[in-house]
Amino acid sequence: MKKNFYLLFLLFSFHFLYCQQYPKTVKDIESQYKKNISKYPTPNDIEKLKELITASDKIDYKEGAIKGKMILLNIYNELSDYKTSLALIKEIESSDSVGNGRMSSLSIFKSNINKAMGLDKEALKNLQKALQYAKSVSDPDGRHIKSAQVYANLALYYDSKSPNALLSNLQKELYELKQLSEKTSEEKITKYTKIVLNNINIGNYYLGVVKPMRLDLAEPYYLGVYSYKTSQPIVFENNAMNILKGVGRFYLEKGDYHKTIEMANEILVREKQNRNPTHRLFGFQLLADSNEELKNSKEQAKYTLLYAKLNDSLNLIAKKEVGKEVDQLITTVKKEKDNEHNSNLKTILLLVGGFIIIFTLSIWWYWRNKNRKLKIKYHEVIKKLNEESDLSDTSLEIDEINSETETEAKAPIKISEDKVKIVLARMNRFEKSKKFLKKDISLPWLANYANVNTKYLSQIIRNEKDNNFNGYINQLRINYILRKLYESPVYREYKISYLAEECGFASAQVFVIAFKKETDLTPSYFIQNLNAESIA
């Protein structure tokens, strides 16, 4: 009797736990979505989502299943898992009652995947199809929000292709956003938050894309969102750093340095409450630049040093992470080589009877080993590019790539350590400004920019950058074109002569030599491997 009682108790307990763990009704499933799936889903949510999709399928709750798959699609897209993403898109498209809104989103996903694979024409067709679906959404707010989303993606598509099309699509996005209703406080916050980001993008267009820049046209967009500080305080607080950084940069370009300092100080005050060193770095840079223009040498030196120290700290953290990855890579490569050595030794012993076979094997091994070394070098370059992206908020960081430099011994510099740090900080800003792309860049020009004589600048470059002036400039140019080739597939279609001109070299021959010196690879080999990985 007791055994039966315990058995019934255990069965009841398992049933209770099962019912608690797996939702059985639409209400349960929706509750689980709200309770267990984070607002910004991560790979950690994948298994939870799969369970909710399975539970939705069991009770034929199609909306629940599609919702889970759409969230999964976002995660896989972030992970650049294009194969899984395409399979999931096909699965969702085959579902009943997907709706025009979601079909628009699926077309955007397709566009992003095609663009990442270098299929620009297909990517554009996907976006045009997405717009057709968006315009067919029956609900007015749904129609406007989806259309705005498509225009934002079209603006991104035309970013490096057509400035006019870029601006046109940003303006169309803004028009759609302004049509959104404001019936509830939540709708109002969502609407104006999206308008903030759009306005900053349009302001950035007039400041950074149009040449010469149009400060008069940028001003209403920057100051319009800054006015939200009083008219839309909640929206302003949610987007304060983006707004302050945009407005601060605008005032710096306008020459209103006192306003620039005001924005920078507010950035630093807010950063103390919500720690983010990249925001602090931006604030230091604004203060250093504006005080330099105002001839406040003491303040300029103070914030330049703070900028230099923080920037060094961020670079040190990044390099430590790179070091860990490199150590792991070296260990893995060493094991692979040891295994291959043992295998090849047995092979050689078996083939020792024939001179011709040994000779043939030697040639084969030479080319195989050479290709392997090139492949390792290639992956080292890719790893470095990926690691540099971790500090993308502070713009492109230029790290060293192994290269042969002059063997001249380092010599002590007869200037103060603080002066050296100030010069290095100015050189860092020079690197971020991409002025090294100018063909007529020279040592006297850079010395004037860094406010130091050419002799000291040469010694600082040799001591701190482990290079001479020409090697330093070539290294910056090669790192610039490496990132362009890695991030923008369209660059891989250009001729070597165009790539050389794009990054400031006088001839294709000099460019190829510099590229080989910095990476141990030729531009053609690097592009060939990038394209092969994109197809795979």
Image (cartoon, rainbow, N blue to C red):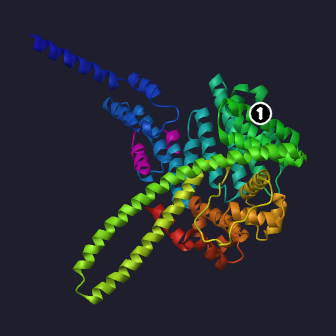
Q: Which percent across, then down, holds residue 427?
A: 75, 57
Q: Is residue 144 left or right of residue 443?
A: left
**Residue projecting furthest to the top:** 1
Q: Is residue 496 magenta?
A: no
Closer to the camera in the image, 49 or 137? 49
Magenta segment range? 84-104
Identity of the amino acid at label 1?
A: Glu
For residue 164, which quarter of the picture?
bottom right
Q: Which percent across, then down, holds residue 159?
A: 67, 55
Q: Secondary structure at mark 1?
A: helix
Decide: is 235 above or below 407: above
**Residue projecting furthest to the left:** 1
Examine the residues drawn in magenta and state their main secondary structure. helix
Closer to the camera in the image, 144 or 319? 319
Closer to the camera in the image, 341 or 292? 341
Q: Which percent across, then down, holds residue 514?
A: 63, 73
Q: Is residue 96 magenta?
A: yes
- At 67% across and 49% down in the image, what residue appears? 312
Using the rendered image of the protein, determine whether residue 199 is visible from the camera's viewpoint. Answer: yes
- Point out the image quarter for the C terminus: bottom left
Q: Is residue 214 left or right of residue 378?
A: right
Using the rendered image of the protein, determine whether residue 171 is visible from the camera's viewpoint. Answer: no
User: Which residue was labeled with disc 1?
Assistant: 266
Q: Is residue 197 left or right of residue 247?
A: left
- At 33% across and 86% down in the image, what residue appears? 359
